[in-house]
């Protein structure tokens, strides 16, 4: 399903938005960025806790750092959940058809988020509060931390897979559960980009957390001082930001092309430029001979924040462009279905019978009859001549109609008609039959699930159609 017109068209919801669409989009971007900040700190904090705890087996200072970081994870995970309500509601309202379609296609994985989140929170609390009690069983304690961190890696992947699936309506009929959705392009590049962002943002957060005025961390460490901590966390943030820049091109090339634009490229370029400046400042802090000061931290934080805004806005710009044409088709399909429902109700109330005009006849009368009469020249040759030439080759009419050219003098050049092979074959067969003096087919009642075609019923159905056109 490469053509947008061939993508599945779920029914839209014929209800007005509860607020202006621009306001909803702005809220979606801002609330998502606020939410994802705490998700980044939750995921990055759980990963660094485990890594530092492993390093702490040989260097006790890292065990101390790991314990302090674990205390931040439980707070940030609660904030991530609370702050996630806003963007979840916004995406439900603004992208209802796309979001719920993705949720339905991933099925059990989406439903399983509730028990997964519950288990991850319990493991995180056990790991935090059982630090002293499990001091004699360090392997067990570390295993609990690893299990909690692993769940924190899985949960965002489910959300990301669903959001990614929204962008691929052409693949919806191919998806058979969550695992197949994981194989869609863009899932893994976006996920690794997200993980790198989580580590980078967490490292900068910990830089402020441990080096803030009044923090007694130095009195609890044996070999690490403030200068060493500054280099440590800036180094982690620098490396993770570099990985983001490496994964960025993969994210772009695996996205559907219909969402790309020069405007989007410009927004992304601004974000990348800000990130490069922030990386330069981080490097200068790493090599700085100053013992403990971090005067560039605010500048780095500001640049990274602006980068996040640029990338978050760019993500939304892409999403809007990627599904814009398909969303119009979904809306048009919804209007058509509602018109058919109104017509069916009118026929049921009046006892009228729906007359189905054959597809070939409908297209001939609406498109071809202006130039081609049955037995006389109007603008183009008559059907009797066309039938004689193409009686055994209706596909030749299709080929000619899609790419006509002037064959002979005395006839006006025919414009091309891109109606699709099914419609062109139907009208070709009708024209050959009519030109041959054969019965091209009569109207009939449509069977279950068939296209009702051209409905001759007046009244309520026609009023409904006029309303839609208005």
Image (cartoon, helix red, strand yellow):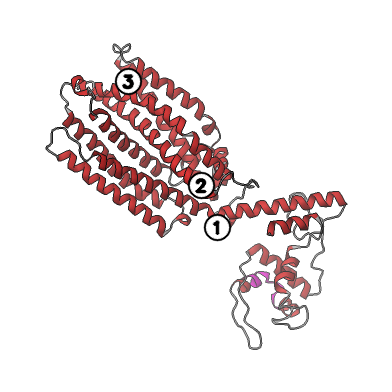
C-alpha separation, residue under disc 1 versus residue under disc 3: 51 Å
Q: Which range of residues does the magenta coloring cover?
A: 389-398
Disc ID at residue 23 = 2
- Whether tag 1 and tag 3 are in contact, CB under 8 A, the answer is no
Q: Residues within 10 Å of mark 2 (few under 14, many from 20)?
A: few
Disc ID at residue 142 = 3
- The image quadrant that residue 382 belongs to is bottom right
Q: Which residue is mark 1?
A: 3
View extreme (bottom): residue: 409
Is residue 82 placed above or below 468 in the rendered structure?
Answer: above
Q: Left or right of 186: which side holds 422?
A: right
What residue is drawn where x is 20% and y is 33%? 230
View extreme (left): residue: 289
What residue is drawn where x is 46% and y is 55%? 259
What residue is drawn where x is 82% and y is 61%? 443
Q: Residues within 10 Å of mark 3 (few under 14, many from 20)?
A: some
């Amino acid at each position: 399903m490469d053509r947008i017109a061939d993508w599945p068209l779920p029914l839209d919801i014929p209800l007005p938005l509860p607020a202006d669409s621009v306001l909803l989009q702005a809220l979606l971007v801002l609330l998502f960025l606020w939410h994802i900040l705490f998700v980044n700190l939750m995921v990055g904090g759980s990963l660094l806790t485990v890594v530092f705890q492993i390093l702490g087996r040989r260097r006790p200072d890292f065990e101390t750092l790991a314990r302090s970081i674990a205390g931040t994870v439980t707070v940030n995970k609660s904030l991530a959940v609370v702050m996630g309500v806003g963007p979840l509601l916004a995406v439900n309202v603004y992208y209802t058809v796309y979001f719920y379609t993705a949720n339905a296609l991933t099925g059990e994985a989406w439903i399983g988020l509730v028990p997964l989140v519950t288990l991850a929170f319990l493991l995180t609390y056990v790991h935090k509060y059982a630090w002293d009690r499990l001091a004699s069983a360090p392997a067990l304690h570390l295993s609990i931390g690893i299990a909690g961190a692993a769940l924190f890696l899985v949960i965002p992947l489910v959300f990301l897979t669903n959001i990614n699936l929204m962008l691929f309506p052409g693949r919806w009929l191919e998806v058979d559960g969550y695992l197949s959705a994981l194989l869609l392009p863009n899932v893994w590049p976006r996920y690794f980009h997200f993980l790198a962002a989580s580590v980078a943002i967490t490292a900068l957060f910990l830089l402020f957390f441990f080096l803030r005025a009044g923090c007694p961390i130095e009195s609890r460490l044996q070999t690490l001082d403030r200068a060493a901590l500054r280099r440590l966390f800036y180094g982690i943030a620098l490396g993770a930001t570099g990985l983001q820049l490496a994964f960025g091109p993969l994210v772009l090339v695996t996205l559907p092309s219909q969402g790309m634009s020069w405007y989007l490229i410009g927004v992304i370029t601004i974000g990348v430029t800000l990130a490069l400046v922030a990386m330069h400042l981080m490097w200068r802090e790493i090599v700085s001979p100053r013992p403990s000061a971090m005067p560039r931290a605010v500048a780095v934080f500001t640049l990274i924040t602006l980068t996040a805004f640029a990338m978050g806005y760019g993500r939304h710009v892409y999403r809007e462009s990627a599904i814009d044409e398909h969303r119009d088709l979904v809306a048009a399909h919804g209007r058509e279905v509602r018109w058919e429902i109104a017509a069916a109700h009118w026929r049921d109330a009046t006892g009228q019978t729906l007359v189905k005009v054959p597809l070939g006849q409908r297209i001939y009368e609406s498109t071809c009859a202006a130039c081609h009469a049955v037995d006389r020249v109007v603008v183009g040759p008559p059907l009797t001549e066309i039938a004689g030439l193409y009686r055994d080759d209706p596909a030749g009419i299709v080929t000619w109609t899609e790419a006509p050219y002037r064959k002979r003098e005395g006839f006006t050049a025919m414009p091309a008609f891109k109606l699709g092979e099914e419609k062109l074959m139907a009208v070709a067969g009708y024209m050959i039959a009519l030109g041959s003096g054969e019965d091209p087919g009569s109207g009939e009642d449509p069977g279950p699930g068939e296209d009702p075609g051209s409905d001759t019923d007046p009244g309520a159905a026609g009023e409904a159609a006029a309303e839609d056109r208005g």
